[in-house]
Image (spheres, rainbow, N blue to C red):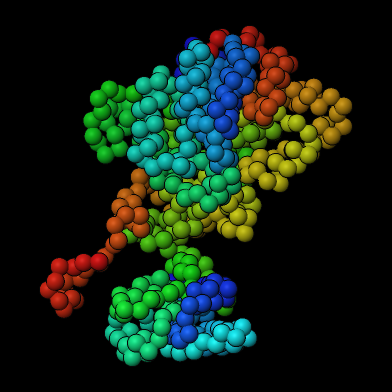
Amino acid sequence: MTLREALSSGRFVVTAEAQPPKGTAVDEALQQAERLRGRVAAFNVTDQQSSVMRLGSLALCHLLVERGLEPIYQVTCRDRNRIALQSDLLSAAALGIENVLCLTGDHVSLGDHPQAKPVFDLDAVTLLVAARELTQGHDLTGHELAGTPRFFLGAVVSPCAEPVEPQLFKMEKKVRAGAGFFQTQAVFEAERFAAFMETARGFGVPVIAGVILLKSAKMARFMNQNIPGIRVPDDLIKQMEGSKDKEGTSAEIAARLVRDLRGLAAGVHIMAMGWEHLIPRVLEFSGLPAPAEAA
Amino acid sequence: MIIAERKPLDAILGMMTPYHKVLVVGCGTCASVCLAGGAREVAMLGSLVRMTRQTNDEPIEVAEATVHRQCDKEFLLPLAAEVEAADAVFSMGCGCGVQLLAETFPQRRVFPLLDTKFMGVTLEPGWWAERCRGCGECVLDRTGGICPITRCSKGLLNGPCGGYRNGKCEVDPTVDCGWLLIFDRLKELNELESLRAILGPKDWSHGAFGQPRRVVRDDVRTSAEEGHV
């Protein structure tokens, strides 16, 4: 079942993250994905996350497709102009990749090549426009394509950003530009997400809520201080601090969150940050009925 | 105006090393207003260079001249004799000034003493901020008079990314999120609905990323030559 089918069937979808390596050693990422086969609907393959130069998202997506695993190809506007972006989208389609998550991308100054020239020729909204144009058989300038790609386009939104109104404004634009699903920044408070969904639900597009596995109280505090749009409440930080079994507590917190989000979101995107082995436990604790069908 | 900053003294002395008689040319317009290369800065640098070279036993003669502005040839031509008398010319104008000096006096090496930073405004004495990227196709009518190309670190056209925190940009916590400024301004003006329009993809061919740009006004020009850059 594809991600598109899973979301339109109305079942609660679980996706995980796959991070391309810094280098060519793809085995670990592939083994990690392999261990989650059948447990998650798709693997979100990051595009040089945090502006750190890595192996390309397209290559890892292709390797996943080869193994019968469903990727979500993340594409950012940071490093490529509209010519390269459209070309890579066509390449993705030719390699059997259908799901595309369109993002602005972090600024280059946050990564490991801060001297680079940032591109941002398109933004997330106009990247969606470009991708949709391709699916209609022509490029951004109206030139006809020989062979038309098929995409399931997604976008991102930050539901706990303050203020959230500009996020909702842009989200609506993204829907009009062709976004068929959303993935969110990490959520730690279901109530805040519920408040966000009161407006977001009106856009009629499935929203997959982001869930990060907390690894320590220190990490939670760091995120609170440094990561825009993330707010870990004090009681969770205390819970992590007082825990002797960090992995167990982390999985419990995430499972509780997944349970709370079930009635609110179309699914969850679990960002395990190296603790991928905990994902099956999180899903089990959360009481999700059956493991997701093989991706 | 164009905002510039003087290069570090070491770099300046480095460029001057081979010469014994130099002409330092200030600019009375932008570079002067932003306190980087006006008559006062020329005099100060002149003394500094003479003193340092003297101390190092390598004396140098520094002639000083500040023109009304360096980006118009008519103000540069009167410098001909001083340029002729110098081994090399050092400009305290912006990059435009440096280049027009070099074009006007091709027989002399011309060096830059400033780093040209941006087009900006004075926020308070000693504090200048960028306001325009010269994209060639102004969108300020759509964004409440606040430029998203300049004020958003990513130059986004359709609203903020998810990187704002306490009203500031993820790139630098001392920088306001340009899109939150635009959002608030349009809200105050009761024009938030106008933000729903999808802007772009922008035509960057009007911007500073391709061939050198020119503006030719036939109603003003005096020569009949083909406009060239």
Nearer to us in this view, A233 or A128: A128
Q: Is residue B143 above or below residue B67?
A: above
Hey, which residue is sitting farthest left in the picture? B224
Nearest the viewer among B105 and A156 is B105
Residue in the foreground of this view, choosing between B27 and A136: B27
**Residue A142 spot, x, y in % from top left:** 24, 36
Residue at x-position 68% and y-position 15%: A280
Which residue is rendered at x = 86% and y = 28% of the image?
A243
Q: Is residue B25 left or right of residue A161?
A: left
User: Residue placed at 46% from the left, 58% from the top?
Assistant: B150
> Residue B36 in the image: x percent, y percent?
51, 78
Does residue B212 appear to the left or right of B57 in the view shown?
A: left
Reply above or below: A51 against B86: above
Percent across and percent down for residue A189 are 69, 33
Q: Residue drawn 48% across and 26% down?
A: A59
Decide if residue B227 is in sight here.
Answer: yes
Q: How many marks?
A: 0
In terms of depth relative to the viewer, which is nearer, A35 or B96? B96
To which quarter of the image does residue B70 belong?
bottom left
Which of the 4 image quarters holds residue A194?
top right
Report if residue B68 is visible in the image: no
Which residue, as the protein is rendered here, is positioned at the far front?
A: B57
B84 in relation to B95, above or below: below
Q: On the rendered structure, is A228 left or right of B102?
A: right
Where residue B126 appears, x then y in whole percent?
58, 76
Depicted A156 relative to depicted B101: above or below: above
